[in-house]
Image (cartoon, rainbow, N blue to C red):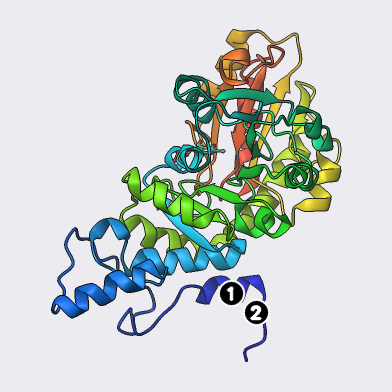
Amino acid sequence: MRKRLKIDSELVHLGRDLDKSSGYVNIPPYEGSTILHHDIADMKNRVRLQMNGEPSFTYGTEGGPAHQAFYEAMNQLEGGAGTWAYGTGLAGCVTPFFAFVQAGDHVLVTDSVYGPTRDFCETLLKRLGVEVEFYDPLIGSGIERLIRQNTRLIYMESPGSHTLEMQDVPAIIAAAKKKDVITMIDNTYATPLNFNPLRLGADVVIHAATKYICGHSDVLMSTVTCSERTWPEVKRVSKILGQYASAQSCYLGLRGLRTLKVRMDAIGAHTQAVVDWLSQRKEVESILWPAYPKDPGYAIYKRDFSGPIGLFCFTFKPNFTDEQIDKFLDSLTLFGLGYSWGGFESLILRCYGKRTVRNRTDLDRMVRVYIGLEDPSDLITDLEHAFSAIQ
Ligand SMILES: Cc1ncc(COP(=O)(O)O)c(C=O)c1O
């Protein structure tokens, strides 16, 4: 038996099946709706295999060889029983809710949840008769006090959108387990390399593969990887709701995994250099980055994560006006002004307090920065130039 490989080596070989790819290193993305069968016996056999949960292709929506290879890779990385892919990150965040909740249920969702997931909870879930309560991301084991008789699931995101609080995920999972509550987590920031909640007992792990996994800002997709007990229902509901990601997206997802470690290492080092420089600037009031020792989430980050993320926020000192902060952003030439993150290019945007940052109104002077693969000295020169434009 082959010795368990180091993660760098594992990423190079995950999901490869030379029989299915006719020997090609990367399994080709067969796109198609219809699959032709040799005869009735073949049709029956493929259905039987499917019913047993074994890979077998009968129709396009089931996914094909590229899906299968990508799913296998994600299962292995996250320690899951099954993975499904969806056409956007958001679809992966919201679809699993339908596997678990019904009218009359209560769900606990982190207050730092990605905005559109929050919108889903506040609109569609409520309309379906599900009570949604947003909990403080710093609650830790205190979540036990919020669990009621009808609490069905807890939805985490760590660090959380914009304010990047690290949650005590192991403590939340432990509290949920005591009361048999399902735990789901948006693990996009960590990637499957830095944190694996299923291995700690979580039930469902979501990645907006749009970000780091695909990594080149040219794909929208997510993956949902499940524990043994949740996989059958998540799969069933995903099929019922017609959820599908294209073969091309899965092919690009698997290709992205091959270089994920080197990209994450470079992004982490570049982010460290930019944060170190920013922390010395007189214009900067605070920096929110879990890998920064002064960050309130640093202790949990050190305990649970095996590497940093390329996303952080910083706030300007109170003497800076709205117009000056806008001018700062407009003066940047290397950073792209845009939503999203996880690609090879650095991005920046403004967070407008309550509009983007949930229940906090104190963060109007905050900007969100994503550091990509440019040389950090060039990024620093760009930031320096923008700071001088607002003196
Ligand atoms: C944490 C997180 N989850 C999910 C998503 C959704 O991904 P997509 O834009 O592909 O729908 C995003 C997008 O920004 C995100 O930041």
Mark 2, residues whose alpha carbon is within 10 Å: few (<14), some, or many (≥20)?
few
Judging by the rendered image, the residue that carries numbered circle 1 is 10
Q: Quadrant of the C terminus?
A: top right
Q: Nearer the viewer, residue 221 or 272?
A: 221
83 left or right, relative to 246: right
Dot label at residue 5: 2
Q: Residue at x 42, y 68 (%)?
A: 53
Q: Residue at x 61, y 13 (%)?
A: 354
Query: Is there CB contact under 8 Å for labels 1 and 2?
Result: yes
Image location (x, y in percent) of residue 77 = 59, 65
- Identify residue type, mark 1: Glu
Describe the element under mark 1 as helix, strand or loop. helix
Q: Residue at x 61, y 9 (%)?
A: 322
**Residue 218 in view, yes or no:** no
Q: Is residue 68 above or below residue 151?
A: below
38 left or right, relative to 346: left
Mark 1, residues whose alpha carbon is within 10 Å: few (<14), some, or many (≥20)?
some
Q: Quadrant of the N terminus?
A: bottom right
Dot label at residue 311: none
